[in-house]
Amino acid sequence: VLGSASSPTSPTANTLMAALPSDLRAVMKSCTKYTDNNGGGNTASNVSSTTDYLFLLSEYEVFATHQYCNDAEPNYQAQYDYFKAGNSKVANKHSATGTAAVWWLRSPYSTYYYFCAVSSSGSLDYNNANNAYGVVPGFCNAWSHGVAIGERRP
């Protein structure tokens, strides 16, 4: 859906990446993100890296907590300055800009078969992945020197 594995200069058709303006895609760089990519347990060995151009944010990058995600995920992450500054976590629907929407995070719930999400009120939540919710993707740009703003290297 995001098209994060495709190149910004040659995005996969019918993905969010392909829908972004070409001048924005021109400054996007790949970055490494750490996530519990195995799920089903709260172990450090489940956390691994992916290299993406477009990604979902993690529980820790938004909330600076690890209430639901794998306890080891925050070892490789930092809260983004935007959220650290106290800015709203509420996202609105694209089709009804005055209506708040639930949006997905990339962090799986460490002990259940759910994913973390941000509720329509802006608080941390989780839900079954079969629900249709919004996304608030992140990306790295040419000015971040290969590290996403707020991201720590392992």
Image (tube, rainbow, N blue to C red):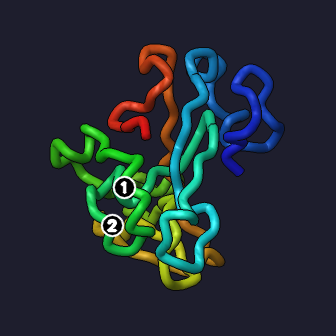
From the viewer's perspective, tell me whether residue 66 is left or right of residue 27: left
User: Is residue 14 shown left or right of residue 50?
Assistant: right
Q: Which residue has dot 2 on it? A: 66
**Residue 22, image x, y percentages:** 66, 19
Instruction: Tell me which label, 2 or 1, sits earlier in the chain.
Output: 2
Badge 1: how crowded within 10 Å, few (<14), some, or many (20+)? many
| Quarter of image, res 122 | bottom left
Marks 2 and 1, Cα distance to the nearest angstrom? Answer: 7 Å
Q: Which residue is drawn at 83% across and 38% down?
A: 13
Examine the rendered structure and indicate whether residue 32 appears above or below residue 98.
above
Q: Position of residue 12 (x, y in %)?
A: 81, 37
**Are discs 2 and 1 less than 8 Å apart at CB?**
yes
Residue bearing mark 1:
74
Q: Is mark 1 on a helix, strand or loop?
A: helix
Q: Circle 2 — which element?
A: loop
Given residues 108 and 9, the one toward you in this image is: 108
Which residue is the extreme one toward the right?
13
In the picture shown, does residue 104 fall above or below 128? Answer: above
As shown in the figure, which amino acid type bears the numbered disc 1? Pro
- Amino acid type, residue under disc 2 in the picture: His
In front here: 127 or 21? 127
136 or 29, which is in the foreground?
A: 29
Q: How crowded is mark 2: few (under 14 residues within 10 Å), some or many (20 or more)?
A: some
With 45 as the anchor, is 19 left or right in this view?
Answer: right
Quadrant (top left, top right, bottom left, bottom right) of the C terminus: top left
The residue sitting at 67% across, 36% down in the picture is 17
Q: Residue at x 59, y 72 (%)?
A: 39
41 lies above or below 7: below
The image position of residue 130, as x and y in percent, is: 65, 77
